[in-house]
Image (tube, rainbow, N blue to C red):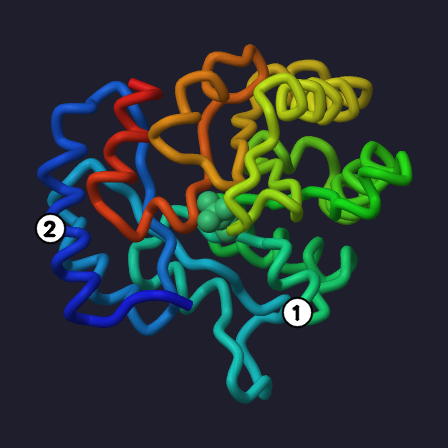
Amino acid sequence: MNGSLVANQALLKSLIELLKPISSVDFSVCVPYPYLSQVADLLRATSIAWGAQDVCEFGNGAYTGEVSASMVAEFGCQYVIVGHSERRSLFADSEARVALKFSQAQAAGLTPILCVGETLEQRESGQMEAVVASQLDAVIHHAGVASLAKAVVAYEPVWAIGTGKTASPDQAQAVHAFIRSHIGALNAVVAQNLSLLYGGSVKGSNAAELFAQPDIDGGLIGGAALVADDFAAIGKAFG
Ligand code: PGA
């Protein structure tokens, strides 16, 4: 829940210029709903995709205050984030609800970016793999493992989001390898082709070593995406 019409305009104009030379990387910007029309107008003629940060678990109907996947799709979105840890922890998005959101997104032709990740307490008590597996399985049981062929998965350790604490490249790689093998046990091809992003305090200074890991295919960037130069530095580290 960052941004304003004025700030977005300046940020996106800078991003368009700064990201243009980094042609080997796929970029997408996911924004709060009221700004979808603005990003669509600004990014339509560029190679940067756009999307939303959440979506309702139901289709259109009497759900006052909610926004459906088909509404989001009308604004030319390619992506929608589902299951961000802030949605899970602050807005009671259960695993079952996240699975419904995932399917709503796909039914509307959007690519869900499914976020998974453990809290510090869960990591320290040895539950990290069980937590991440359970978050994945909720979607796999609801939508089928093949649904992940048209999705992106983002590993975001809750303790690293917005905290300045990044998972070390080894820590992140270990969980990414776990995610790929967990999915691979059900469908090797889907697991191999899956785009697996790391998120949690990614910055220009730590991006290259994270992206160098064999199972890290990209990043989901929060705070650093609010400053065009910082975001571009992360893009360059990948490109
Ligand atoms: P951060 O946020 O990059 O600021 O840690 C990541 C996120 O919210 O997905």
Quadrant of the rendered structure where residue 239 is?
Answer: top left
Question: Is residue 110 among what the camera can see?
Answer: no
Can residue 128 be seen here? The reply is yes
Separation (CA) of disc 2 from disc 1: 32 Å
Disc 1 crowd rating (10 Å Cα; few below 14, some 14-19, many 20+) is few
Q: Tag 1's secondary structure?
A: helix
Residue 100 percent coordinates (x, y): 68, 59
Query: Is 148 displayed left or right of 67 in the figure?
Result: right
Give the mark nearer the N terminus: 2 vs 1.
2
Q: What element carries label 2?
A: helix
Quadrant for the N terminus in the image:
bottom left
Residue at 74%, 48% (x, y): give it: 119
- Marks 2/1 in contact by CB < 8 Å: the verdict is no
What residue did someone put label 2 on? 13
Q: Is residue 189 above or below residue 39?
A: above
Q: What residue type is labelled 2?
A: Lys
Q: Who's the residue at 30% across and 24% down the image?
A: 25
Q: Residue at x 54, y 13 (%)?
A: 213
Amino acid type of the residue that numbered disc 1 sits on in the rendered structure? Leu
Q: Residues within 10 Å of mark 2 (few under 14, many from 20)?
A: few
Numbered circle sitting on residue 51: none
Instruction: Choose between 195 and 234: the one closer to the eye.
Output: 234
Looking at the picture, how far across and down is residue 228, in whole percent? Answer: 21, 45
228 sits left or right of 101 in the view: left
Q: Mark 1 points at which residue?
A: 90
Q: Where is residue 166 in the image (x, y as percent from the top left)?
A: 55, 35
Residue 137 placement (x, y as % from top left): 80, 40
Answer yes or no: disc 2 within 8 Å of ligand 1.
no
